[in-house]
Image: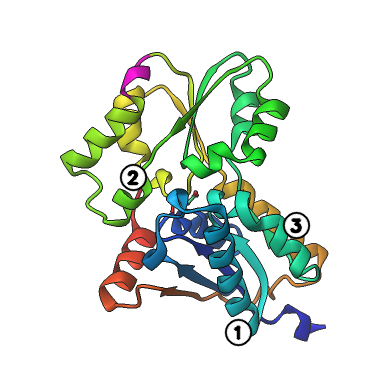
Amino acid sequence: MSGCQEGFVGVFDSGVGGISVLRSLVSELPHEDFRFFGDSANAPYGEKTVSQVLDLSRGIVEGFLADGAKAIVIACNTATSVAAAALRSAHPDVPIIGIEPALKPAARALPHGRILVMATEVTLRLDKYHELAEAWGGECEVIPVPCPGLAARIERGNLDAPDLREMIRGFVGDYSGHVDGVVLGCTHYPFVRRQIADIVGQDVRFFDGGAGTARQLRVRLVGAGLLADRDRSGRVEFASSLDTPAELELYRSFFDLSV
Ligand code: DGL
């Protein structure tokens, strides 16, 4: 029985964004081993074509499986929208968990609210987002806010720099004081939650998919008999397609960041 619990959980994103999800995964499942892969050499995914994101996602997942992954978390809203269905049908025996903009919890918490959904252009264009807005938008006013360039800028760190604050102001400045909730529909954006709140208002509620994804991973591991033993401590490893010491140091600094 213990043999089926072996193996790591492969987690990937176009870059540092997925580390916001990784933090939730480690907190929910501290006994698991996680291997994080950031495709920073190919970021941002949100400005690539659907077929490019599909090919990149396939390559990463095949690499994880060749190395012995027991489950996969697509810690990227864009790659989930593009590739989750294809990856699941190619690997039906592997738990593959994706992430989607947390519109459902936002609409439940603010049933008549005005809710911004910040995400990449690709995420907001594809069917998955429109189905989500249709299913859960209800009586809310849901406003999609594509943020081209924001994930790529976050990749470069220095998150309190004036240029980054100005960029965020360009996307959400018009809603300052006129919004109830913000859905962070790209996994990079939780790292600038405070900077967004400084512009839209401190009483605005924020929602992201990290905790829900972590709970979903637990459910799938339990269901498949793959949960690690509780008497062990999990390990977290980082890898990047920009495989330099500086990039891996940047990943570790995002993992340790207080947000
Ligand atoms: N972090 C990703 C997401 O959740 C992608 C950002 C990007 O590479 O454009 O959508």
- Asked if residue 176 is among those painted magenta in the image, a careful observer would answer yes
Residue at (82% x, 63% y) in the render: 223
Instruction: Look at the numbered disc 3 and give the secondary structure of its residue.
Output: helix
Residue at (54% x, 42% y) in the render: 123
In-front residue for pair 61/125: 125
Whole-Å distance between the Cαs marked 2 and 3?
Answer: 34 Å
Stretch in magenta:
173-177
The number of numbered discs placed on residues in the rendered structure image is: 3
Observer able to see residue 232: no
| Mark toward the viewer: 1 or 3 | 1
Q: Is residue 155 left or right of residue 210?
A: left
Q: Is residue 30 left or right of residue 170?
A: right
Would you say the magenta stretch is mainly helix, strand or loop? helix
Q: Looking at the picture, which amino acid does disc 3 mark?
A: Val
- What label sits on residue 149 in the rendered view? 2
Observer able to see residue 154: yes
Residue at (37% x, 49% y) in the render: 151
- Mark 1 or mark 2: name the one nearer the start of the chain: 1
Instruction: Look at the numbered disc 2 and give the secondary structure of its residue.
Output: loop
- What label sits on residue 67 in the rendered view? 1
Image coords of residue 54 (percent x, y): 59, 61
Q: Residues within 10 Å of mark 2 (few under 14, many from 20)?
A: some
In-front residue for pair 85/16: 85
Q: Is residue 216 left or right of residue 201?
A: right
Q: Residues within 10 Å of mark 3 (few under 14, many from 20)?
A: few
- Asked if residue 195 is among those painted magenta in the image, a careful observer would answer no
- What label sits on residue 219 in the rendered view? 3
